[in-house]
């Protein structure tokens, strides 16, 4: 969106020049504490258990 | 922002300098309206596509079994939808990259793979339900699904192969606007307004209290209203559309309006289900519900509901398949943009094609328990959702990445509350499956 004194130029994002974004490549992986890592692992275990329970429940309903 | 910045296209589109084409306007009001219309799209599409075939089925089943009693839950999900998707908007605009790419880069390959596999599995199962709904609706309309389903799949593939993001977006926004037909359907069915308003604003439980079936349906409602694919879809869509930092407020408005449309349409679907209950019909699937409503609403109403069911499935299919293709393309480093022609993004388009083709093929297998698959997938999405939101929450608190666009403390309070509620619902589901007698079933109560 460009502006001059008495008029405005509206540009579609796809017609505009590429905008500078955050350089995510240079950041590398996020620093995680041991507790965050443990929490994510627990989450993984919880998810596997929950998915198995849902599958079991659906199979029971199907019978 | 204080972060290091980089000028680049994440989607594999050549970042050559091209002449800027714009429209000249004279008033600020026109400038704002035009800018909004140019930014408008990803928010509406993600929200309306969320009212996919599974959602039509779940909301109408909720109405058909419990009347308008569960309307307040749907209304409660409006801010939840908005808050979650608004975070995705910020992340997409700041990084110009998709959600899968961000998880890979910031959490490493192992967690990236975990999120990607979860997404692809739930997405594919959901796609099966979309085509199952198309199959059901076509059968009820007297169209042979053996021809209708492949035709729908071919149309969905053609939709993305135009090599133009804008063309795809315009067609999909038009399909989204057709969702307004649900308002007419609800209006024509003449619901008791006082009761609708009361049940929407005052939390109440259906007669029979909390039963396992009610909990299963509530989790399915939550699972269908906020789905993991939405996070991946909207962020990739924003990256593909190359929204700019200056577009943030319009992208937020787009998302908010989308949330309002989708929740209101969901209320209308529940009202349609409640109307069939009032006339003494037993719910089996939404296509049968359309036929039942047709007996007192007329054949036009029956056909309109069936067409809306197909429209919902088409919208869901294109959005979900794209979220899978975008996510996979980002992780593999393939060119992955709707702006690219087929020959420049073969991997990206092939994955979309495989998702659509395989899901369409599976539903043509005779005698699959379609309604059960639909409900089961919604519950599965509800179970996986908390973990997807936790990754989103961690990314949005990454000040090194987002700087001033990172979450504020009040954002975190809201989001952790949402995550806690979602976990509680998941745990209730686990408890009721592990110990079915925990919540006694109401005698003669409705069953899922």
Image: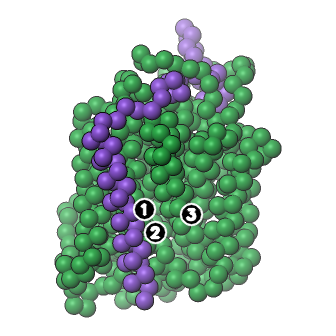
Q: Nearer the viewer, residue B201 or B164?
A: B164
Q: Position of residue B437 (x, y in %)?
A: 21, 83
Rendered image: mark on residue B124: 3
Secondary structure beneath dot 2 equals helix
Chain identifier matching the green colour in the rendered picture? B
- Report the quarter where the N terminus of chain B lies: top left
Secondary structure beneath dot 3 equals helix
Residue B219 seen anywhere in this rendered image of the structure: yes
Dot 1: chain letter = B
Q: Residues within 10 Å of mark 1 (few under 14, many from 20)?
A: many
Q: Which residue is disc 2 drawn over? A: B377
Rendered image: mark on residue B240: none
Q: Quadrant of residue B63?
A: bottom left
Q: Residue at x 36, y 23 (%)?
A: B404
Rendered image: mark on residue B381: 1
Q: Residues within 10 Å of mark 3 (few under 14, many from 20)?
A: many
Q: Quadrant of residue B167?
A: top right
């Amino acid at each position: 969106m460009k502006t001059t004194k008495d008029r405005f130029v509206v540009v579609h994002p796809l017609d505009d020049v590429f905008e500078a974004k955050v350089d995510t490549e240079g950041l590398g992986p996020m620093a995680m504490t041991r507790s965050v890592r443990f929490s994510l692992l627990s989450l993984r275990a919880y998810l596997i258990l929950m998915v198995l329970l849902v599958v079991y429940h659906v199979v029971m309903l199907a019978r | 922002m204080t972060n290091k910045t980089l000028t680049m296209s994440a989607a594999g589109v050549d970042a050559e300098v091209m002449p800027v084409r714009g429209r000249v306007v004279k008033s600020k009001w026109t400038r704002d309206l035009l800018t909004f219309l140019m930014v408008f799209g990803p928010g509406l599409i993600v929200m309306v596509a969320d009212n996919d075939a599974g959602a039509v089925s779940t909301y109408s089943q909720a109405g058909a079994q419990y009347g308008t009693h569960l309307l307040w839950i749907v209304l409660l999900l409006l801010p939840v939808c908005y808050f979650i998707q608004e975070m995705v908007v910020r992340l997409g605009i700041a990084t110009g990259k998709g959600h899968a790419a961000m998880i890979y880069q910031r959490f490493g390959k192992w967690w990236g793979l975990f999120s990607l596999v979860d997404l692809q599995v739930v997405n594919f199962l959901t796609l099966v339900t979309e085509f199952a709904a198309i199959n059901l609706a076509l059968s009820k309309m007297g169209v042979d699904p053996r021809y209708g389903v492949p035709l729908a799949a071919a149309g969905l593939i053609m939709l993305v192969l135009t090599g133009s993001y804008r063309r795809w977006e315009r067609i999909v926004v038009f399909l989204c606007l057709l969702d307004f037909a649900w308002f007419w359907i609800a209006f024509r069915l003449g619901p008791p307004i006082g009761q609708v308003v009361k049940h929407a604003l005052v939390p109440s439980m259906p007669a029979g209290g909390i039963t396992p079936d009610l909990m299963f349906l509530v989790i399915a409602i939550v699972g269908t209203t906020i789905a993991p694919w939405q996070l991946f879809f909207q962020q990739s869509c924003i990256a593909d559309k190359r929204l700019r930092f200056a577009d943030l407020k319009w992208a937020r408005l787009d998302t908010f309006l989308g949330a309002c449309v989708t929740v209101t349409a969901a209320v209308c679907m529940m009202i349609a289900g409640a109307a069939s209950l009032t006339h003494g019909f037993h719910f089996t699937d939404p296509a049968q519900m359309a036929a039942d409503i047709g007996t007192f609403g007329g054949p036009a109403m029956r056909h309109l509901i069936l067409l809306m069911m197909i429209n919902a499935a088409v919208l869901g299919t294109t959005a979900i398949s794209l979220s899978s293709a975008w996510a996979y393309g980002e992780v593999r480093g393939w060119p992955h943009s709707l702006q690219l022609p087929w020959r420049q993004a073969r991997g990206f388009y092939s994955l979309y094609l495989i998702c659509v083709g395989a899901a369409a093929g599976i539903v043509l297998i005779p005698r699959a328990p379609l309604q059960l698959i639909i409900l089961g997938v919604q519950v599965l999405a509800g179970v996986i959702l908390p973990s997807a939101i936790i990754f989103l929450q961690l990314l949005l608190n990454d000040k090194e990445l987002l700087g001033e666009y990172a979450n504020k403390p009040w954002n975190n309070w809201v989001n952790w509350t949402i995550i806690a509620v979602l976990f509680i619902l998941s745990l209730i589901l686990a408890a009721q499956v592990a110990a079915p007698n925990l919540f006694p079933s109401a005698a003669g109560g409705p069953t899922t």
